[in-house]
Image (cartoon, rainbow, N blue to C red):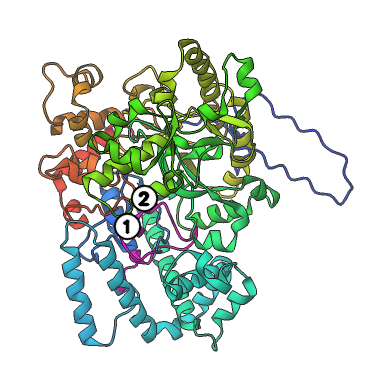
Amino acid sequence: MILDAKSGEVKAWEPRSNRHFIVPQTADSDAIIIADSQASINTRTWKGAGVAIPVFSLRSEKSFGVGDFADIRLLVDWAAATEQRIIQILPINDTTMTGTWHDSYPYSANSIYALHPQYLRLDEIGTLKDKERCQYYEQEQQALNALPDVDYERVNRIKNEYLKEIFEQEGNAVLVSKDFLKFFNENKYWLVPYAAYRTLCSETGTPDFKQWGAYAIYDANTIAAFDTPESPYCQTMRLHYYTQYHLHLQLQAARTYAHSKGVVLKGDIPIGISPRSADAWSTPKYFHLNSQAGAPPDDFSVLGQNWFLPTYNWDEMEKDGYIWWKSRFSKMAEYFDAYRIDHILGFFRIWEIPCDAIHGLLGHFSPAMPFTAEELASRGFNFDKNLYTYPYVREYMLGEIFGQYTEEVRNEYLSPLGGGCYGMRPEVNTQRKVYDLFAGCEDERSKTICDGLMRLHDEVLFVEDPVKIGHYHPRISAWQSHIYQSMPEYQRHAFDALYNDFYYYRHNDFWYHEAMKKLPPLLSATNMLVCGEDLGMIPHCVPAVMDQLQILSLEVQRMPKDVNSQFGCTWNYPYLSVATTSTHDMSGIRAWWEEDRNNMPDFYNRVLCFGGDTPYFCEPYVCERILEHHLASPSMLVILPLQDWLSMDEQLRRKNPLDERINVPAINPYYWKYRMHMTIEELINAIEFNNRLREKITQSGR
């Protein structure tokens, strides 16, 4: 129930049935602590609107070629002026590993705690006394800020130069200050391993800690010696302390400023960490470093996604009460009032891919309950391990896949087995070997052969479980394979039946209990509002868990939860949800319009309720109607990408909608370099647009 703190009057009751607690036998000195799930109170009246944009995409007059934490304060001013109450960003953890643009991927952090140095506002740290160097950095700032996109490598190289120089000038005084020492003592449990990790990355020239010789296995006593005056690593370690301290101050300042304007910040917790991170190095017991996490195929990636991130050792994490996750959430709570759990389905089950595979098609759910050969037989499927778990390569397939290079492939990469059947030669008998063999080759021949050999490896009907030997997972999307098509009809029918059961029914209770074992203790670690990214292949148990734990779902109109609907109905969204038009992994609504033109007439006439012919482009009035529908939805939060907010204004929106794309999941690695095409100052001064937006938000009751 909810009570008035002063009068004790009951304001609201929980609508569900009574909770029951059986008091155990205890001694007089014992204390009983009841840590229950969150209360479910029907006080569903407040609704808000907000904007989503990565910090690196922000552009202000003072930016240094990339958005920074000080830019958030300007964005807060715009949000407050338009009655928006929440700013959602992408992960901001440090991803520095290779020193190249590959590090621009924000979902592969080198630490779950450390913040990325690129987000520092340099002039708020201090001013260099050397006038010549000041002039140099001013020129670099102007040049970088004029670029249409983020030049990740140059930005970080120049910012790191500045950090080293200002540290030499100011560092010693800061490191003995009371405020810094307080920060250090509260954070040294992660700060020391992180600083050592960054130091050794630089010293060895690689983030692969397996190649660090004596330091390949983390030892806390050895690493503690790095931070002693006699150590050659001392100053580098302390530079990283200094950098993280200032990042902490600037992000907290952004949060404090946001609160003063009635705005909150919403962070993003990635589902994975890098296999070459400080976390994997210092706490390897929490991870399965011999497997990869990803996602099953969908409309955006027909081969599935391979994130090349390790999966979690949940059994080990459970032993200490999930302290690793709780610490991670607690650190986030220092900066954010709400957070998005990236791929919340990973707490139910993760799509696990063998390390020798590249495509997500060869993955399987973990944990899961794979079939035995005996169970498959009992369900009417005649299982043959040699036929169904090894690449199915037949003569008739080769011409279709390799074209003019068929003879070369047959002679150099395949071994004849007789009867028009082939096996893969040892040098190409895994996708990883194929990938490595053709790495860096961009000519048509190499790409055709490489893609074709990869495709041959996907030609399996079952994937054997790597732990439960003799247990088998039906390969995802197997009906698209030649091996499936080659089976007699009765085998296909039997496979279809067990496939549907496996992916849609078999695991419901199992995955429900997996999620309820993990999520409640993690969510109770902070008071932040929890939002889950529940897109993709959603088990039936997911909505029940999210509703029970009061986790907001994510509703995207072009990805309806109802499999029988082509578009989501904004009027039917649940209150406990975040409604959005697009995510960072999708094109904006304007580009989507052009990509999916065949379906747009139905969307235009039936969903948006416009009459007449469908416009060829997503005109401002169309975008405006889409935004209005979202604002009018029952969802607690409507958080739209900045690009989609601007889409309803002909003068403010970008000319080419394709330039608004943040990420393309099917391309790995992808260069995350999107920047606003206008400054936040210009956006704040767009008075007419801001008045229109504020009016729409307030009229919608948000």
Q: Earlier in the sequence, mark 2 or mark 1?
A: 1
Circle on res. 390: none
For residue 685, above or below residue 123: above
For residue 639, above or below residue 618: below
Circle nearer the viewer, 2 or 1: 2
For residue 509, above or below residue 205: above
Of residues 66 and 102, the one drawn nearer to the viewer in this rendering? 102
Residue 443 appears anywhere in the view: yes
Q: Amino acid at mark 1?
A: Ile
Q: Residues within 10 Å of mark 1 (few under 14, many from 20)?
A: many
- Kindly identify the residue that appears in the image at 19 percent across and 64 percent down: 145
Residue 114 in magenta stretch:
yes
Would you say 390 lies left or right of 434 here? Answer: right
- Kindly identify the residue that appears in the image at 48 percent across and 46 percent down: 356
Circle on res. 89: 2
Would you say 131 lies left or right of 397 here? Answer: left
Residue at label 1? 72
What element does badge 1 sit on? helix
Q: Residue furthest front?
A: 418
Q: Which residues are magenta?
A: 98-122
For residue 442, above or below residue 344: below
Of residues 673 and 462, the one drawn nearer to the viewer in this rendering? 462
Image location of residue 339, percent across then percent down: 45, 46
Residue 439 in magenta stretch:
no
Q: Amino acid at mark 2?
A: Ile
Residue 665 appears anywhere in the view: no
